[in-house]
Image: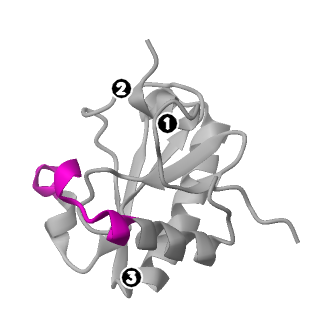
Amino acid sequence: MSSVFSRIIAGELPGRFVYRDEEVAAFLSIEPVAYGHVLVVPVAEVDKWTDLPPKLWAQLNDVAQTIGRAVIECFNAERAGYLIAGFEVPHAHIHVFPANDMSGYDLSAAMPADSTDPEKMDEAARLLRQALDTDESGRLNQA
């Protein structure tokens, strides 16, 4: 059975994409620690980050770093938080989020999906796509 992330990538479930290429997808977390919390995932369904091929792991981190810069800029954050947990969904992923302190590193304190403000989520996605120069599907805009 496909992971929830595979289903989002396939378009079977909704997602607010901010980046996407053939190997990596990035979309907003539905249970964010802060607005602008992004999940960076490989398109290939691999459970543990330690099982990713080195080239794909490097690409995932390159995208996470680019998104981290955008998160800092868009949300006036001191830093971009970076976290790998992996227990909540069996599909490797990197959490990237606005961080001004250590509170974002406690995923158990994330906002429940039904308590997020859809307008704030849409605005967070819009700001990140603008900074990354991507369209609503997360693909880079063509010049």
Specify few, some or many for label 1: CA neighbours under 10 Å numbering under 14, 14-19, or 20 or more: some
108 to 52, vertically: above or below? below
Secondary structure type for disc 2: loop
32 on left or right of 133 = left
Secondary structure type for disc 1: helix
Q: Residue furthest left?
A: 109
- Of callouts 2 and 1, the N-terminal one: 1
Q: Distance between the residues labelled 2 and 1?
A: 14 Å
Q: Are marks 1 and 3 in contact (CB under 8 Å)?
A: no
Kindly indicate the quadrant of the structure image that contains residue 22: top right
Identify residue type, mark 3. Phe
Report the front residue among 36 and 85. Answer: 36
Q: Mark 1 points at which residue?
A: 8
Q: Where is residue 127 in the image (x, y as percent from the top left)?
A: 51, 76
Report the front residue among 143 and 119. Answer: 119
Q: Give the range drawn in magenta.
A: 106-121
Q: Mark 2 points at which residue?
A: 90
- Of callouts 1 and 3, the N-terminal one: 1
Q: Residue at x 34, y 71 (%)?
A: 120
Kindly indicate the quadrant of the structure image that contains residue 10: top right
Q: Which residue is drawn at 48% across and 84% down?
A: 73
115 to 100, vertically: above or below? above
- Of callouts 2 and 3, the N-terminal one: 3
Secondary structure type for disc 3: helix
Identify residue type, mark 2. Pro
Identify residue type, mark 1. Ile
Q: Which residue lies furthest to the top in this view?
A: 1
Q: Do the residues labelled 2 and 1 touch (CB within 8 Å)?
A: no
Q: How far apart are marks 2 and 3 (CA)?
A: 29 Å
Q: Name the residue under label 3.
A: 75
